Structure formats: C-alpha cells, structure tokens
Image: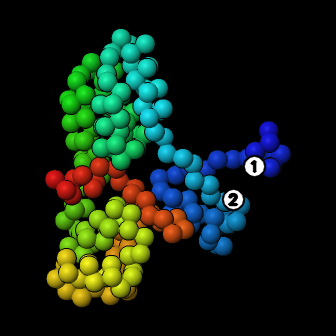
Amino acid sequence: MKWFGYSDICVVYSGSSRSGIDAMFKDKNKAFYNSAFMIDFPRLGIEFVRHCRNILHKDFGLNYDTNELMHYYNKLDHSPFWFMQLVNYLLVHHASLKEGINFVNKTIIEDGRFDVLAKELTTLDKTILHLVVMGVEKIYSLSTLSEISNKVGKKTSSSSAQGVIRKLIKKGIISQYKDNFYIELPGFINYLKE
C-alpha cells in the first residue's frame, strides 16, 4: 500500500485529544518519540449526516430531515461519537429528534461532569474560552488582552492568559496543535451558555 509516498506499513493513531497524541510523539522520554507526524483529517460534515440519515431511512424505515439532523450535528460540536449516540437512540426508541437530542445532551452533561467543571472555571477562564471558541487567533495581543480586561473587570496580562490556556488544556476542555485550538468537550460550550 502506498500512502503519502511511503510503501511500508503505515499506522493511524487516534486518541481522545490532539494535544495528548501530539505529546506522545514530541516527548523524547516516551516510546513513540519522533515515530510519527500529525496530519489533520478533515471534519466529517453533511456527507456523514446524509449517510446516517440514509441508513435510518433505507434499513429501518425511519424518516428524519437531513437539515434537522445537520442542525443537531452542529449542536453536538461536530462530534461523530455523540452524533452516533443520537442515531442509536433514534434506532432503538423510534423517537423524535428533539427527544433524542435531549437524551444525548443529558448524557453528555453527566458523562463530562459539566456541572463540576463549570464551577471550577473563573470568569477569566470562561472569557478566554469564549475567545478560543470564536476562533480569535491573537489571544495574547494587546488589543485582545485589553478586551479581556474590560470583560472581567481587572487587568489581564499575557502570562495570566497563557496560564488560563494551560489550565483549559490540562482540564481537557481544549487542546492545541500548532497555532490552532480545538474544543475537546462537545456540548460544554452550549452548557456554559445555558
């Protein structure tokens, strides 16, 4: 098999977070040091949702609207795992999408211990997390730090913002790969908003 120019056996590693997988290959004291490199796979999108919808319809006679399913996939932060939990619930219970998403959301909240996690976050943590979710790239810039300071009501330094980012990564809420941040807890942002 020839893959990315290599003719030898290739392995695909996956894990619960990008930063955890990345750390496996960057720590020279670990067994996998420098044995692989990361390639970001594209996110599953409407094709994945259509595929699931077609299985529900053709194989089980359940008819759900693709756009509605896509709406809920977006609400689940594009998590294939949680979307498949929704699909499984629909298969077993022949339920409405609203009933299915309510079940999945409750499961996500309980599984992730969102109530405990939310209490552990300060206003500064939540403000910076919001900026990460919004895709703000220059979190440590003077203008962004000034905006953060205004929102939290006290001066925020670059080092305190970096400390928050480290805290969010350590708690498994976000991960960082190169200059990009990723949400690692699907549904948590919606939970905080509500």
Amino acid type assigned to the residue bearing label 2 in the image? Ala
Helix, strand or loop at label 1? It is loop
Q: Marks 1 and 2: which is nearer the front?
A: 1
User: Height in image: 145 above or below 67?
Assistant: below
Looking at the image, tell me whether mark 1 or mark 2 is earlier in sequence order. 1
Q: Quadrant of residue 98?
A: top left
Q: Quadrant of residue 63?
A: top left
Q: CA distance from mark 1 to mark 2?
A: 13 Å
Q: Residue furthest right?
A: 7
Residue 100 x %, y %: 25, 30
Helix, strand or loop at label 2? It is loop
User: Height in image: 26 above or below 182?
Assistant: below
Q: Nearer the viewer, residue 138 or 90?
A: 138
Q: Quadrant of residue 29?
A: bottom right
Quadrant holding the N terminus: top right
User: Height in image: 106 above or below 167?
Assistant: above
Task: Please state if 113 lies on the left or on the right of 180 as rendered.
Answer: left
Amino acid type assigned to the residue bearing label 1 in the image? Phe
Residue 176 x %, y %: 47, 66
Residue beneath disc 1: 4
Q: Which label belongs to residue 36?
A: 2
Residue 23 x %, y %: 56, 66
Please tell me how crowded label 2 is: few (under 14), some (14-19), or many (20+) other residues with Cα within 10 Å. Answer: some
Identify the residue at image location x=43%, y=59%. 182
Identify the residue at image location x=35%, y=39%. 73
Confirm whether residue 6 shows in the render. yes
